[in-house]
């Protein structure tokens, strides 16, 4: 598979920040997520690819073509910025058809293509509305349709799930998966949210302080998250798994090391699962509870968080739990304590 | 009456010229950082800082018929002083600043990512300017043009030096006041002066109308 986007030795210096020797290769048609905290340089890298500025050093290739010195309109890379920035003076249809109009496509052809995309993204009923009358989720879908309408070589999405509520977030994630599957376009998606990254990415690049620290598949990051070495970049209790069956309405997810996690989901195949550390119950004995998931291990790390204490429990998989200070002392827990960690099937997020 | 018509005409031409020059210049100053930007910005603001008779002197040392630029035009039979051209040149110098500044501020407050989105979708910079940028800044352009128009119609100091003739309304009012006093002057049934106060009242009416237009545009902009 060829390169969708390749960044080679890219460096650029501003007065107070620098992108340092970035190297990156994104397969054509793949879904890549650039992950990092605020101020790590993700958006600046995205803007370099979009053509907002010419980097001091290095090259950017799109579909094998060096676009480093080309103006944005010649790169065939659609940019969808943060906060789903739409053209407020145009209706939804005009927004979606903007790029096609700029290229001089006849109206009938524009209509055909925009109608298909608006159907795909569930915004057909909004065609005559103006952006000011749209919700955050609707704006995001319009922004996505507009980016895809010109059939670009790649789409650059900057924090596409910012400024939308949790419910809308999961629906947009589903749209992103569907659109990517249907169009096969190369996607570069920027986020600071590790779970968001894990839920859509085929590969993840982690940035910090203007440097690309690591690139890998979400499962690789999850493996590191659940191993003893750990990864500071990924969430606690993020596990890669494979749905192998269903029992009494519960999905059975094989997470390796002979462990099965039970969860509620309608997803199939490879998934990522996540459990919030505060939803993990710790006990020194194996007790009968309604929780469907049970892990055994020893406490390998204790971190004082003030009123609560974070425990790393190492065993078949590494599990993180957060307990109150009072429970910690009453249970006389310490490094080396043998414990059971429980969590309910309903507490498992399947990404 | 012809002086008032001349005022409206030359102020209108000035406003038009201010838009044609001020939009690209304001765009450049608002969007880009480049060496000499602050210097250009300061030069544009100078007319707001200096007495306008001084501005008139500065202009006539360049555009006077025997001076650097004026002499060249005079060689082709074009007078840059004491003519409509001279009036418009003077008014552009003293009032186009308002349009440039309005556009500059509007461009600065416009999210630069809007243009990047447009161009990433394949739109040229011209198409982007016409379809994305201009619809977002047009109210500032109109406001700047109205301010320029209003300022130009009230100019007197620089015109005294650069283009005393043909007299625009502000100069006519001064002449009537200095020659005949405040009120209408009639001698043997012949009107010597329509009265400085009457012409001034008409100018007040026109300028108030412009001010109301400005307020209406401003209100729409705030909505």
Image: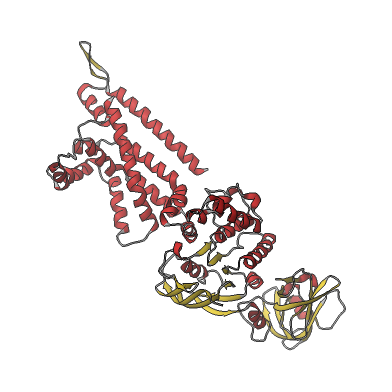
Q: Is residue B172 above or below residue A127?
A: above
Q: Residue A64: image x %, image y %?
A: 48, 74
Q: Report the front residue among A98 and B115.
A: A98
Q: Residue A78: image x %, image y %?
A: 52, 63
Give left or right: position of A285 versus B188: right
Q: Quadrant of residue B91?
A: top left
Q: Report the front residue among A302 and A102.
A: A102
Q: Residue at 58%, 51% (x, y): give it.
A: A93
Q: Residue at 62%, 54% (x, y): give it.
A: A115
**Quarter of the N terminus of chain A within the rendering:** bottom right
**Quarter of the C terminus of chain A within the rendering:** bottom right
The count of marks equals 0
Give left or right: position of A157 versus B38: right
Residue found at the very far top of the displayed protein? B188
Q: Residue A141: image x %, image y %?
A: 61, 58
What colour-coding does the image apply?
A: secondary structure
Q: Residue A260: image x %, image y %?
A: 79, 80
Residue found at the very far right of the displayed protein? A288
Q: Is residue A124 above or below residue A255?
A: above
Q: Residue at 29%, 24% (x, y): give it.
A: B1
Q: Quadrant of residue A32?
A: bottom right
């Amino acid at each position: 598979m060829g390169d969708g986007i390749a960044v080679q030795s890219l460096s650029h210096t501003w007065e107070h920040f620098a992108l340092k020797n970035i190297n990156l290769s994104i397969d054509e048609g793949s879904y890549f997520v650039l992950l990092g905290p605020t101020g790590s340089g993700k958006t600046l890298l995205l803007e370099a690819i979009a053509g907002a500025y010419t980097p001091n050093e290095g090259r950017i290739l799109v579909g094998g073509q060096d676009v480093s010195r080309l103006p944005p309109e010649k790169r065939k890379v659609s940019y969808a910025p943060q906060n789903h920035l739409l053209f407020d003076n145009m209706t939804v249809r005009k927004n979606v058809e903007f790029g096609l109009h700029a290229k001089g496509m006849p109206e009938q052809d524009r209509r055909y293509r925009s109608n298909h995309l608006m159907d795909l993204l569930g915004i057909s009923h909004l065609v005559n509305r103006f952006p000011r009358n749209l919700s955050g989720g609707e704006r995001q879908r319009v922004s996505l349709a507009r980016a895809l309408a010109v059939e670009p070589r790649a789409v650059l999405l900057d924090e596409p799930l910012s400024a939308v509520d949790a419910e809308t977030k999961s629906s947009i994630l589903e749209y992103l998966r569907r659109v990517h599957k249907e169009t096969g376009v190369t996607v570069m998606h920027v986020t600071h949210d590790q779970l968001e990254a894990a839920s859509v990415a085929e590969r993840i690049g982690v940035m910090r302080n203007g440097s690309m620290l690591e690139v890998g598949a979400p499962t690789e990051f999850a493996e590191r998250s659940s191993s003893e070495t750990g990864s500071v970049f990924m969430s606690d209790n993020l596990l890669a798994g494979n749905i192998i069956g269903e029992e009494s309405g519960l999905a059975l997810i094989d997470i390796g090391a002979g462990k099965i996690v039970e969860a509620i989901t309608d997803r199939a195949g490879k998934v990522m699962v996540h459990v919030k550390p505060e939803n993990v119950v710790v006990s020194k004995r194996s007790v009968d509870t309604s929780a469907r998931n049970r892990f055994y291990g020893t406490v390998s790390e204790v971190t004082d968080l003030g009123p609560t204490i974070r425990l790393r429990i190492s065993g078949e998989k590494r599990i993180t739990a957060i307990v109150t200070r009072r429970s910690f002392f009453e249970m006389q827990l310490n490094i080396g304590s043998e414990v059971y960690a429980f969590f309910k099937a309903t507490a498992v997020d399947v990404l | 009456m012809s002086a008032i018509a001349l005022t409206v005409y030359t102020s209108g031409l000035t406003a038009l010229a201010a838009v044609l020059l001020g939009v690209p210049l304001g765009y450049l100053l608002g969007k880009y950082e480049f060496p000499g930007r602050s210097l250009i910005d300061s030069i544009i603001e100078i007319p707001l800082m200096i007495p306008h008779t001084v501005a008139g002197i500065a202009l006539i040392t360049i555009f006077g018929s025997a001076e650097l630029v004026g002499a060249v035009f005079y060689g082709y039979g074009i007078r840059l002083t004491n003519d409509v051209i001279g009036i418009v040149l003077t008014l552009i110098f003293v009032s186009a600043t308002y349009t440039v500044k309005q556009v500059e501020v509007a461009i600065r407050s416009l999210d630069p990512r809007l243009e990047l989105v447009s161009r990433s979708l394949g739109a040229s910079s011209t198409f982007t300017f016409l379809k994305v940028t201009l619809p977002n800044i047009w109210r500032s352009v109109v406001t700047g043009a109205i301010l320029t128009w209003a300022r130009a119609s009230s100019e007197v100091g620089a015109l005294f030096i650069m283009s005393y003739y043909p007299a625009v309304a502000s100069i006519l009012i001064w002449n009537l006041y200095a020659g005949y006093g405040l009120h209408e002057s009639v001698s043997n049934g012949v009107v010597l002066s329509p009265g400085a106060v009457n012409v001034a009242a008409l100018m007040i009416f026109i300028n108030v109308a412009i001010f109301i237009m400005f307020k209406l545009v401003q209100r729409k902009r705030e909505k």
